[in-house]
Image (tube, rainbow, N blue to C red):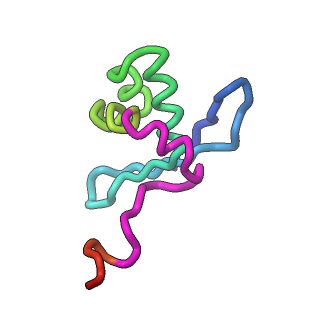
């Protein structure tokens, strides 16, 4: 598990955690702090350099940039956005 400090708006947050193991069937998961750090770095440089620095695929950085507003409003330890709690279809 890696930890990286988050620096935004002139203050330093706690640590952002990241679980990585692409092989062996373990899914990679990143918390909101990690994603926001990647977005900030991508804004300063570019998506490719951010992907290389944070060891993720460039497409993820692009997707996170599209989700930026949702990520800012989300809980900092949240890993994903979940759908409706009571099913996909409306009750009849």
Outermost residue, bottom side: 92
Residue drawn at the location 56% of the way across and 46% of the way down: 73
> Does the magenta segment cover residue 44?
no
Instruction: Say which residue appears at 36% left-offset and 29% top-offset.
Output: 51
Which quadrant holds the C terminus? Answer: bottom left
- Give the prevailing secondary structure in the magenta stretch: loop
Q: At 64% from the left edge and 29% from the top edge, which residue is drawn?
A: 8
| Residue 87 at x, y percent in the picture | 31, 76
Residue occupying the far top of the picture: 45
- Range drawn in magenta: 66-86
Outermost residue toward the right in this view: 11
Q: How many marks?
A: 0
Residue 23 picture location, percent across and down: 27, 53
For residue 52, above or below residue 82: above
Q: Is residue 10 left or right of residue 68?
A: right
Name the residue nearer the viewer: 58 or 69.
69
Q: Horizontally, is 54 left or right of 4 in the view?
A: left
Q: Magenta stretch: residue 70 in it?
A: yes
Q: Is residue 10 left or right of residue 15?
A: right
Q: Residue at x 43, y 26 (%)?
A: 53
Closer to the camera in the image, 36 or 89: 89
Residue 12 location (% of width, % of height): 71, 33
Position in image of residue 44 (x %, y %): 49, 15
Indicate left or right for 59 with 41 as reference: left
55 vs 81: above or below: above
């Amino acid at each position: 598990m890696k930890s990286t400090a988050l620096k935004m708006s002139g203050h330093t947050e706690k640590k952002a955690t990241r679980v990585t193991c692409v092989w062996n069937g373990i899914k990679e998961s990143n918390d909101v702090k990690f994603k926001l750090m990647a977005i900030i770095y991508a804004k300063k440089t570019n998506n490719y350099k951010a992907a290389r620095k944070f060891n993720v695929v460039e497409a993820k950085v692009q997707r996170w940039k599209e989700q930026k507003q949702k990520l800012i409003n989300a809980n900092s330890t949240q890993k994903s956005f979940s759908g409706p709690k009571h099913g996909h279809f409306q009750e009849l």
